[in-house]
């Protein structure tokens, strides 16, 4: 009788580890589903390095000789935002654009991103560098409009498309598996609004815990039944 009881104690002692493992699995699934956004980010180039722009293109007013970048990508936050590829220099970009009184020259690096970042059914153009001559008081948005039309903005003045890319959508939310959770108009799908995305994580966690409890219970009953049988 002593051996089955020792087995039961061992099984019960392992229960916290089983529950912890189930919780870890659920946490991993929820982390994988963390949402990101597909949008155009703005960058400034200083001392040969890109710096994430904390201003919108209509607010940023670069000076003559500055380099500004735009990158289209799926991004979770500014800390992991993809930078424009390439190392553009002002001298190379604007070598053929002479200075002119009352204006300024801005070099722009426009990176349309990779196929992985592209909305479904669209192919990103190749990255390119351009030189814009604009009014001395002009903004980065003015420089972009001078070399990369058509541009598209939403009702909140958020930059949605450069050179017509992408054809639709604007900073739409993207789920952890890379699928868009908004339609082309920028409205959330009903499944997302209803919290369908949160249901799978909770269900997986519940199933894991229930399975652990069931396994321990079945083995415990078997041990008690064996002990009772031996006493008979």
Image (cartoon, rainbow, N blue to C red):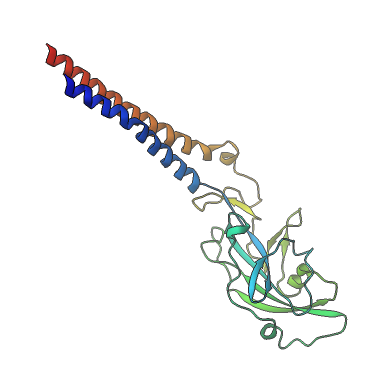
- On the rendered structure, is 195 left or right of 137? left
The residue nearer to you, when weighing 223 against 100, is 223
Is 211 placed left or right of 186 in the picture? Answer: left
Q: What residue lies at 54% left-to-right and 60% top-to-bottom?
A: 121
Q: Which residue is rendered at x = 80% and y = 86% of the image?
A: 99
Q: Whole-percent x and y of residue 85? A: 58, 72
Image location (x, y in percent) of residue 69 = 67, 70
Q: Residue at x 77, y 72 (%)?
A: 62
Image quarter where the C terminus lies is top left
Choose top left, top right, bottom left or bottom right for residue 15: top left
For the image, the number of numbered tags is 0
Residue depicted at x 51% and y 62%: 116
Q: Position of residue 158 (x, y in %)?
A: 73, 57
Q: Is residue 83 above or below residue 99?
A: above
Residue 142's quadrant in the figure?
A: bottom right
Q: Quadrant of the N terminus?
A: top left
């Amino acid at each position: 009788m002593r051996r089955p009881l020792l087995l039961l104690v061992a099984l019960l002692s392992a229960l916290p580890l089983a529950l912890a493992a189930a919780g870890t699995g659920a946490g991993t699934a929820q982390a994988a589903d963390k949402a990101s956004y597909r949008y155009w980010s703005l960058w400034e180039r200083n001392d040969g390095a890109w710096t994430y722009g904390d201003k919108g293109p209509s607010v940023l007013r670069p000076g003559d000789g500055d380099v500004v970048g735009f990158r289209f990508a799926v991004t979770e936050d500014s800390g992991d935002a993809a930078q424009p590829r390439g190392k553009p220099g002002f001298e190379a970009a604007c070598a053929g654009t002479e200075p002119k009184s009352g204006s300024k020259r801005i070099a722009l690096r426009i990176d349309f991103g990779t196929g992985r970042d592209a909305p479904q059914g669209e192919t990103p153009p190749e990255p390119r560098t351009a030189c814009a001559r604009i009014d001395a008081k002009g903004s980065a948005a003015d420089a972009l409009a001078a070399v990369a039309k058509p541009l598209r903005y939403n009702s909140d003045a958020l930059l949605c498309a450069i050179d017509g890319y992408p054809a639709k959508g604007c900073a739409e939310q993207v789920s952890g598996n890379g699928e868009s959770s908004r339609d082309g108009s920028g409205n959330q799908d009903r499944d997302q609004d209803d919290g369908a995305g949160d249901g799978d994580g909770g269900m997986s966690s519940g199933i894991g815990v229930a399975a652990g409890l069931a396994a321990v219970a079945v083995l415990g009953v078997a041990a008690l039944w064996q002990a009772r049988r031996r006493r008979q």
